[in-house]
Image: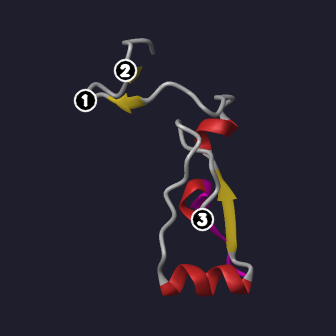
Amino acid sequence: MIKILISSCLLGNPVRYDGSSKPIHHDIIAHWQQLGCLVTICPEMSGGLPVPRPPAEIQTNGKVLTQSGLN
């Protein structure tokens, strides 16, 4: 069976920086979930970051900085 990697927050798991989720509702996602094709991961948590954590963004130079300027 084909496996599809999907971000955990997109399936409603509260793992975003602020402890929330950002679920998407789409028929194909629901279908893949029913088939057991989806493998969920939170890249930030896999990298050792906690929930909640400071908001951060990828800069144009490729570095990731938090709102307070830490990388």
Q: Which residue is the site of mark 2?
A: 67
Q: Which residue is the site of mark 1?
A: 60
Q: Which residue is the site of mark 3?
A: 11
Of label 3 and label 1, which has the lower sequence position?
A: 3
Mark 1 packing: few (<14 Cα in 10 Å), some, or many (20+)? few
Q: In which quarter of the image is the N terminus?
A: bottom right
Mark 3: secondary structure: helix
Of label 2 and label 3, which has the lower sequence position?
A: 3
Task: Locate residue 69, reporting x and y percent.
Answer: 37, 12
Tell me the kind of residue under disc 2. Answer: Gln
Which of 60 and 45 lies nearest the eye of the viewer? 45
Above or below for 71 versus 48? above
Distance in Å between CA atoms under marks 2 and 3: 26 Å
Magenta highlight range: 1-8
Q: In which quarter of the image is residue 57?
A: top left
Q: Quadrant of residue 8?
A: bottom right
Mark 1: secondary structure: loop
Image point (59%, 82%), residue name: 30
Above or below for 6 versus 66? below
Q: Nearer the viewer, mark 3 or mark 1?
A: 3
